[in-house]
Amino acid sequence: MSVGKQHKFWETQPVGQFKDVGATNLPEGPIEPATPLSEVKQEPYNLPAQYEWTTCDMESDETCNEVYALLKNNYVEDDENMFRFNYSKEFLSWALRPPGYYKSWHIGVRAKTSKKLVAFITGIPARIRVRGEVVKMAEVNFLCVHKKLRSKRLAPVMIREVTRRVHLENIWQAAYTAGVVLPTPVTTAQYWHRSLNPKKLIDVGFSRLGARMTMSRTIKLYKLPDSPATPGFRKMELRDVPAVTRLLRNYLAQFVVAPYFDEDDVEHWLRPVENVIDSFVVESPETHEITDFCSFYTLPSSILGNQNYSTLKAAYSYYNVSTKTPLLQLMNDALTVAKQKDFDVFNALDVMFNESFVKELKFGPGDGQLHYYLYNYRLQQALRPSELGLVLL
Ligand SMILES: CCCCCCCCCCCCCC(=O)SCCNC(=O)CCNC(=O)[C@H](O)C(C)(C)COP(=O)(O)OP(=O)(O)OC[C@H]1O[C@@H](n2cnc3c(N)ncnc32)[C@H](O)[C@@H]1OP(=O)(O)O
Ligand SMILES: CNCCCN(C)c1ncc(F)c(N2CC(C(=O)NCc3cnc4ccccn34)C2)n1
């Protein structure tokens, strides 16, 4: 708990405040009531004089390029500045254009003279169930201020502006994650990493050679089969959407906070897109029933300052449902296909039932934590990561 740390902006926001942690008299649910749309500020917040708001049309290849370049050079780095996320253009186009998305929620800031994109923040609409309530929310992500404009209190302006635009669509809650501690996490998840290419990971400093371990012993330790072990394991196709939707809704119903996906959502979020999202089903060879599902997304990182490699190819576990195939076997098949697709590492958060496989399948605990937040929605008490069924990109 960052006791005593001032949060001049977050103290003004309808989020759980550190001073209220432990208070049991506060009701669960919205912190502030919705307001009539006529009372929502109609014009954008003020920016410093030399900057202007811009709406980023992610259907435009040129704008997609600008957003890609801003994030490639200025987005999240690890604490030792060895890696920086390098979300691809195709990934951003997929991540930001789900069913029912609002172009106005793809918000940029340009320098008035050069027209250079210098900041970005996004929202996408999502139906999130919290216990028994399905709540329309904005999932806020890709907050980024150019390195040259940091610590000028631009982030609060970006956050107020996306909040205003979400309010204009009569939506009053949001969900977001961050590697930093803010008022107040609903849960904190731990990253786990499974080496697929241990030699490269050690060479670039992502992992270290274990004590009393040789490189050849390490390569052998992480070896995987050449192909999946489960009969009927295959790539997901459009025709699988109804069955996968049923599997996923039943599975996610077990968690306190989880997305409430319909078939259109499943078609967008879980249908394979090359170099963006890979998803697989297990179709029973006897009954042709779809009994299991697993998926991971592609998020490469730039390797900053290594002579031999420039990119770390990372797969991130997304949603996995096992009803017949043991989860361990299903996830080992996911690792196997990720290795076949030349990924260097497979990452998973200890949310949902992931902890049950990370320890068995030779994952190691990461140094990064991911804090989950809800905006304008109070939970009586923080959740365990295993009570959370939500993976943001
Ligand atoms: C109803 C609808 C509601 C919709 C909105 C819901 C909320 C959405 C919230 C956003 C969800 C984003 C989800 C993701 O994208 S998480 C990924 C965030 N992006 C990065 O880490 C990329 C690299 N870093 C940067 O680009 C900048 O450092 C950023 C832009 C992060 C901060 O810029 P800068 O470093 O130049 O600082 P400042 O002087 O402008 O401002 C300082 C203030 O900003 C608070 N701060 C710092 N980092 C974050 C952070 N990650 N979430 C929320 N707040 C953050 C900080 O506590 C302080 O406030 P306070 O402590 O004084 O109070
Ligand atoms: C919902 N949005 C999640 C996307 C990733 N978000 C924002 C994030 N927030 C904090 C983290 F701790 C984190 N980690 C991924 C794990 C990891 O792989 N750590 C080594 C590493 C390799 N490349 C990078 C790039 C940036 C940071 C760490 N990196 C730790 N991810």
Image (tube, rainbow, N blue to C red):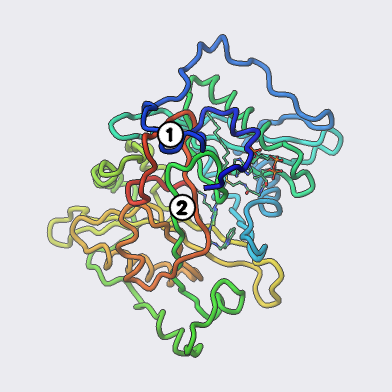
Give whichever of discs 2 and 1 has the lower sequence position.
1
Residue that numbered label 1 is attached to:
126
Residue that numbered label 2 is attached to:
273
Q: Dot 2: what SS?
A: loop
Residue for point 79% across, 41% down: 116
Q: Dot 1: what SS?
A: strand
- Report the side of 317 relative to 94 (left or right): left
In this view, 376 is above or below 148: above
Q: Nearer the viewer, residue 320 or 378?
A: 378
> Is disc 2 surrounded by few (<14), some (14 to 19) or many (20+) residues within 10 Å?
some
Q: Is residue 294 visible?
A: yes
In this view, 227 is above or below 249: below
- Report the side of 314 relative to 320 (left or right): right
Q: CA distance from mark 2 to mark 1?
A: 20 Å
Residue for point 61% across, 74% down: 204
Amino acid found under the numbered disc labelled 2: Val
Ligand 2 closer than 8 Å to the CB at disc 2? no
